[in-house]
Amino acid sequence: MKISNYPKSSYILSADGLTLEEWLGIESIIDLAGDNILANLQFIGDFAFNNCRSLTTIKLPPKLSAIGIGAFCLCSNLRTVIFPENLLKIGEGAFANCESLVCFNLPDSIELIDKYAFTGCVDLKSVTMPEKVTTIEIATFKDCVSLKSVILHEGVTTIKNQAFWNCQSLEEVVIPFSLKSIEDFAFIGCQSLTKLLRPDYVSIVENLKLKIDFFYTFIGDVEPDSTEWDYMWEELAKEPINSICVDPSVCLNNNEVYEYMGTFYDGEILHNFRHRCHPASDDKFYIDIKPSEAYLVEIEEFRK
């Protein structure tokens, strides 16, 4: 009879023993690969290790194929993850806000890294994407403020909305020839990004944030209930395209309304709003609103 190195009170498994549904232990170092029972796991369930703040290092089992939604979310002291060679999927928000995660090697077997997977990993320094990943999903590396370099292999076709939002330290990205689309706000707030490189490390664009419209500089967010907050929504309501709406400040349509996306510098300071399904077109729509004079003075004083 096989006996686990960890007490049964430390974990909950699915009925077939293939999914780790919840980890209840307080160990700082966990070796699932070296355990007589847990080495056979194929799935880490949704939120299985969520908020395990004692965890610093984990070695995942060799037969693991998928990591579930939020599986390691908020493991704020997790520094090292050893992935198995046959892993196929990292789920939505799987390592979100793992603030101490510094580096890892992603196996080339991975086919999908879902949205928000590594958002808020503020200590992460570099990433090389697996060769089978074709899409960098929404906000995958959002707010990874220490991330300096990213290598995307040939085969990547799309970088989605907010993929590298606010990666303030990002200096260069190696872009494959296969890339076809970079969506809105993919690199907003990447004020250090100045080089876009081909796989042969030939620079194809210098000073990106000055030349390409999705490299805005993020200024910040207007505080709700402030004078500027009320002002920009009032100005939004005055825009001609919104006049067809019952309430032109929100333009309710198919349960979608305007969202304030932040304030950015793109030659001038602008408040940006997005509507996922604007009634004028039943499609996604972005609009910029000029700030009040008082707000511009406030920003200028702050920058001094």
Image (spheres, rainbow, N blue to C red):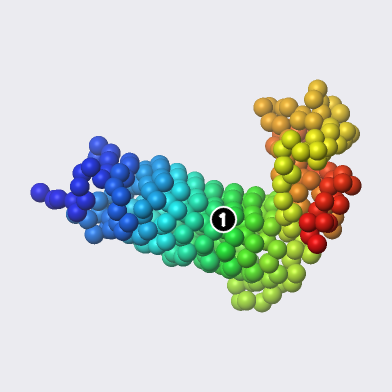
In the displayed orientation, state which residue is furthest to the top: 246
Spot occupied by residue 100 in the image (x, y as percentages of width and height): 46, 59
- Residue at disc 1, secondary structure: loop
Identify the residue position indicated by label 1 in the image. Answer: 141
Instruction: Please indicate, yes or no, whether residue 133 appears anywhere in the rendered image.
Output: yes
Q: Residue drawn at (37%, 44%), measured in percent from left and top?
A: 48
Q: Position of residue 294 (x, y in %)?
A: 87, 46
Could you tell me residue 169's position as x and y percent? 62, 65
Answer with left or right where residue 86 lies relative to residue 128. Answer: left
Q: Residue at left 68%, top 67%?
A: 192
| Quadrant in the picture for residue 151 | bottom right
Instruction: Identify the amino acid type marked 1.
Output: Phe
**Quarter occupied by the C terminus:** bottom right
Q: Is residue 232 above or below residue 110?
A: above
Q: Residue furthest left?
A: 1
How packed mark 1 is, by other alpha carbons closer than 10 Å (few <14, some 14-19, many 20 or more), is many
The answer to whether residue 61 shows anywhere in this view is no
Q: Residue at x 40, y 42 (%)?
A: 46
Going 59% across and 60% down the picture, which residue do you hit?
145
